[in-house]
Amino acid sequence: MRLFRFLALSLLALSLAGCATSKFKTYNGPAVTQVVVQKGARKMYLMHNQKVLKSYDIGLGFAPVGHKQIEGDGRTPEGVYYIDRRNPNSRFHLSIGVSYPNQLDRALAQNMGKSPGGDIFIHGRPPEFRKGGRDWTWGCISVTDREIEDVYAMVRDGTPISINP
């Protein structure tokens, strides 16, 4: 009887574990060779050479017009950067880092006697941030939680990202 109960509980545990979903997806398609963000259109494209693999509607910083210059200005940077890190335990579901600030960004902020800021990411939008407008971040690029799971799987560290006005 004990053996039967043990086997039944083990089988139940294994079947429940198989039902669990993971935020970590796998991707085996063409390599993402560049990420392109069009701020004005609120679109982000994952590219393989000249071909669009995926496109997303995005949210930006709460002051979306113009290039990020200093910490706290609410702007999303403009220019060519690269994906330089990832955070699997992000407060925003998952996130991948953008290499802002670069040397020029630091120099511009220094000339104003300010910090350029940092911690610019592409990330999800957890429940506590779902109310309100589209442009709500402090300068990051946001997509849905489900979309960041795909982006996280597809985009590798070192991938260039071009953020255009």
Image (cartoon, rainbow, N blue to C red):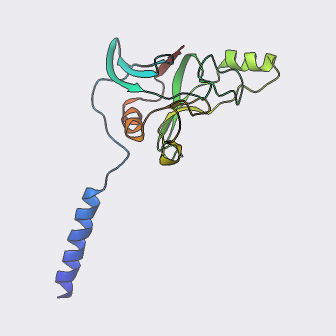
Residue 119 position, x and y percent, is 62, 33
32 or 90, which is in the foreground?
90
Q: Is residue 68 left or right of residue 47?
A: right
Query: In the image as oriented, which residue stretches furthest toward the bottom?
Result: 1
Report the label total.
Answer: 0
Quarter containing the C terminus = top right
Query: In the image as oriented, which residue stretches furthest toward the front?
Result: 132
Residue 147 position, x and y percent, is 38, 35
Q: Quadrant of residue 78?
A: top right
What residue is at 16 percent from the left and 82 percent from the top?
4
Q: Quadrant of residue 153?
A: top left
Residue 150 against residue 75 in the figure, above or below: below
Q: Is residue 19 left or right of residue 158?
A: left
Quarter containing the N terminus = bottom left
Residue 64 position, x and y percent, is 59, 22
Query: In the image as oriented, which residue stretches furthest toward the right?
Result: 113
What residue is at 63 percent from the left and 17 percent from the top?
67
Residue 142 position, x and y percent, is 49, 32
What residue is at 52 percent from the left and 44 percent from the top?
90
What residue is at 65 percent from the left and 28 percent from the top?
74
